[in-house]
Amino acid sequence: MSGSRVLVLNSGSSSVKYQLIDMRGGSRLAVGLVERIGEGGGSRVKHTPADGESREWTGPVPDHDAALKAMAAELDRDGLGLDSPELAAIGHRVVHGGLRFTEPTVIDDAVLAEIERLIPVAPLHNPANLTGIRTAQSLRPDLPQVAVFDTAFHTTMPESAARYAIDVETADAHRIRRYGFHGTSHAYVSRETARLLGRAPEDVNVIVLHLGNGASASAVRGGRCVDTSMGLTPLEGLVMGTRSGDMDPAVIFHLMRVGGMSADEIDTLLNKRSGLTGLCGDNDMREIRRRVDAGDERAALAFDIYIHRLKKYIGAYYAVLGRVDAVAFTAGVGENSAPVREAALAGLEGLGLAVDSGLNAVRGDAARLISPADARVAVAVVPTDEEMEIATQSYALVNEECNPLLT
């Protein structure tokens, strides 16, 4: 294989995010987004080449096929077309890989069929991922297409962490277990945290807090996930932007029997009308903090509930790991909200956890420590880079495929 570029695609239900990365130096040659796909003339394409100004236009993008063709046209304008011999692979984010896919996988018909079979446990994500894969295959049928699964990093969890305490035969028949998500982020951030500490990943225990609109925590021992907060679906765990996170499952029966709500109505409630949105009407942490500072009691309660759940998971994963070398905050809220980081660790000084208020207030794009110099446990802010993780895994895999002696 002579090419050194990887095109990373993240296909959502109404959007496609993409990055073209040169793996020789890890540079991004182009970054783009096609959003509001299928919304008539309201679709938007934004494309930014590395050595030029952003281009943006709106117009009809009726489906994912049209979206990827629009992306291809923008890349072609920069001399980075999909027909370039420098393109080594297309790497796809796939949300759910079940138990079968524990590492990046070259996509063939059998892989596509398994991703499709998993749609019932990822109905919002896997169909869109499949659409992106099939469209990319039609554009470059000769090129390796690689699936990198959000769930793969979490397949190292022991059965004691992955199993729910329900009837085993029923669980196995319906593939009910904790799978976990945001795996590419947790893998990347745990490894970068070890690098920040000047240590090898296999020597470091890290609690990773991926805090965005979707949020998850993981306990990583020596580079391997041993527990994570999301479960069968991305609904379990932390309070999120619109998702409830942990909740007594009997609430669902109560809403059915007493509230007269259907399964679909409850699904919508818990996934789209709960979390911070349900508590205070906002899911943007910046706006919530503005309201808190202005004395808004509803926003303050939402923030307190968010922090309470987060702190519980930090404590739980400290217990699971036994020894913690670092706590790493990442994603939109984790990287940018100093009040969240400070509140999440307040009162945990007895566990060796604290933030330096001055360091915590500093904003930046680089990985950095925000704990006091003499802290027993490092606290880090580590910007996640899921696209680079997908590109790295995809490129390594296709090189192995072409060079068996490297495996």
Image (cartoon, rainbow, N blue to C red):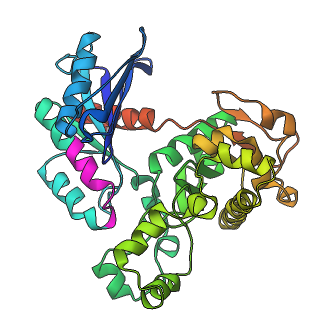
Asked if one can make out residue 42 in the rendered structure from this viewpoint, the answer is yes
Residue drawn at the location 45% of the way across and 45% of the way down: 184
Q: Quadrant of the C terminus?
A: top left
Whether residue 52 is in magenta: the answer is no
Q: Quadrant of residue 311?
A: bottom right
The mark tally for this picture is 0
Residue 41 placement, left or right of 299: left
Which residue is found at the position 22% from the left and 17% from the top? 81
Q: In terms of depth relative to the viewer, which is nearer, 131 or 187?
A: 131
Residue 107 x, y percent position in the rendering: 20, 45
Residue 377 shows in this picture: no
As drawn, 106 above or below 174:
above
Asked if residue 127 lies in the magenta stretch, the reply is yes
Q: Main secondary structure of the magenta part?
A: helix
Whole-percent x, y for residue 156 in the image: 46, 60
| Residue 260 placement, left or right of 248 | left
- Up/down of 382 relative to 315, above or below: above
Magenta segment boundaries in residue numbering: 121-132
Figure check: 381 above or below 115: above
Whether residue 362 is situated above or below residue 228 in the rendered picture: above
* Relative horizontal placement of residue 396, taking residue 355 as reference (left or right): left
Query: Where in the figure is residue 103, as x and y percent of width and height?
Result: 35, 49
Q: Nearer the viewer, residue 266 or 224?
A: 266
- Residue sitting at 23 percent across and 14 percent down? 76
Nearer to us in this view, 362 or 155: 362
Image quadrant occupied by the N terminus: top left
Q: Nearer the viewer, residue 38 or 357?
A: 38
Relative image position of residue 85 (x, y in whole percent): 19, 16
Choose top left, top right, bottom left or bottom right for residue 126: bottom left
